[in-house]
Image: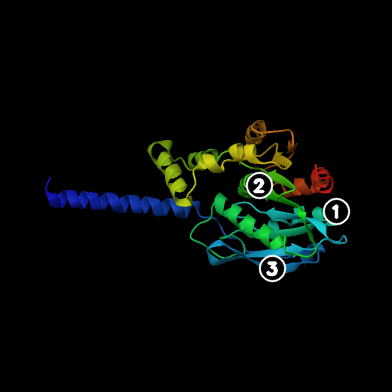
């Protein structure tokens, strides 16, 4: 083979890899769904807020002050992949009625928050850290009684953030996957992408792009580093993330402060969470108001 032929072959390989990388990022991008309503439609008094986050981006959020005399305990609520703050309002309502201040916000590339070059579980966690930094500055909030609640990728993010912090009163994880590789394999299998060679490459490329190994951010591993009480909530009929993954995370707990709550319902469990809000509130009240 001539030198020019080798050059053309190498160039074709480079172009093919670049095209494959673009296709991976395109297929994995988060769908953006801006909010259409507001907490006011649920009878809630609120403030629209803008929260600075990393890379000079801004997060859109709604802050619902507590109805009780301040300082009050508070909960930061984080949506899942392709969702937004509005979709988590059913969870916010019982929290507010129970006397909690509530902060809901959109992660980057979601809802009305700023765009970025990509979204990921670690970036969800970065945005959560920034939301917590904003919340503790609010005069009506008890900074020592702040809990976080996340759904799906947001659940993985609250577990990741909690594994690196010692100032949270409680964590509620709703429908978390046990390991990102499990979720990626299901995504690829649903699209009939063979693991070898393509799926193997996708998993490694995604880890390269997000700058984190999946093992380091996997909920089945981060749960071992969390000190505060944790409630793992999962739908018994969840076909997106099977309930067995909640059992796997729970099995890796470091102590009995990590509880498991299996509820009826599918992956989108906001209605079930509202219906069983008494169980969530019992957990939060014990953690934030007794200090245990």
Q: Which residue is mark 1?
A: 98
For the point 42% across and 46% down, the residue is 205
Q: Residues within 10 Å of mark 1 (few under 14, many from 20)?
A: some
Q: Which residue is mark 2?
A: 162
> Which callout, 3 or 1, points at the residue further toward the start of the chain?
3
Q: Is residue 14 left or right of residue 26?
A: left
Q: Residues within 10 Å of mark 3 (few under 14, many from 20)?
A: some
> Which callout, 2 or 3, points at the residue further toward the start of the chain?
3
* Residue 178 can be seen in this image: no
Q: Position of residue 29 (x, y in %)?
A: 51, 55
Q: Residue furthest right?
A: 69
Q: Nearer the viewer, mark 1 or mark 2?
A: 2
Q: Is residue 251 left or right of residue 291?
A: left
Q: Nearer the viewer, residue 6 or 70?
A: 70
Q: Residues within 10 Å of mark 2 (few under 14, many from 20)?
A: many
Q: Is residue 198 left or right of residue 115?
A: left
Which label belongs to residue 49? 3
Q: Which quadrant holds the C terminus?
A: top right
């Amino acid at each position: 083979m001539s030198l020019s032929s080798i050059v053309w072959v190498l160039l074709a390989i480079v172009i093919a890899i670049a095209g494959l990388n673009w296709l991976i990022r395109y297929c994995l991008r988060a769908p953006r769904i801006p909010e259409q309503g507001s907490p006011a439609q649920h009878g809630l008094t609120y403030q629209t807020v803008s929260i600075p986050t990393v890379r000079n981006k801004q997060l859109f959020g709604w802050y619902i002050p507590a109805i009780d005399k301040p300082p009050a305990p508070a909960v930061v609520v984080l949506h899942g992949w392709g969702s937004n703050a509005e979709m988590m309002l059913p969870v916010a309502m019982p929290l507010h009625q129970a006397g909690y201040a509530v902060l809901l916000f959109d992660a980057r590339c979601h809802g009305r928050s700023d765009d970025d070059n990509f979204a990921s579980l670690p970036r969800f966690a970065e945005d959560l850290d920034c939301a917590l930094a904003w919340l503790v500055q609010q005069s009506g909030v008890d900074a020592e009684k702040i809990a976080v609640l996340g759904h799906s990728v947001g659940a993985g993010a609250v577990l990741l953030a909690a594994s690196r912090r010692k100032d949270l009163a409680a964590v509620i994880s709703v429908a978390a996957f046990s390991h990102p590789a499990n979720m990626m394999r299901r995504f690829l299998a649903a699209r009939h992408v063979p693991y070898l060679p393509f799926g193997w490459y996708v998993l490694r490329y995604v880890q390269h792009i997000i700058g984190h190994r999946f093992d380091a951010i996997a909920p089945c591993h981060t749960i071992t580093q969390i000190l505060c009480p944790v409630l793992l909530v999962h739908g018994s009929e969840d076909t997106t993330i099977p309930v067995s993954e909640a059992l796997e995370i729970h099995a890796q707990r470091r102590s009995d402060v990590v509880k498991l709550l299996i509820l009826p319902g599918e992956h989108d469990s906001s209605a079930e969470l509202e219906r069983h809000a008494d169980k969530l509130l019992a957990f939060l009240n014990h953690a934030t108001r007794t200090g245990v």
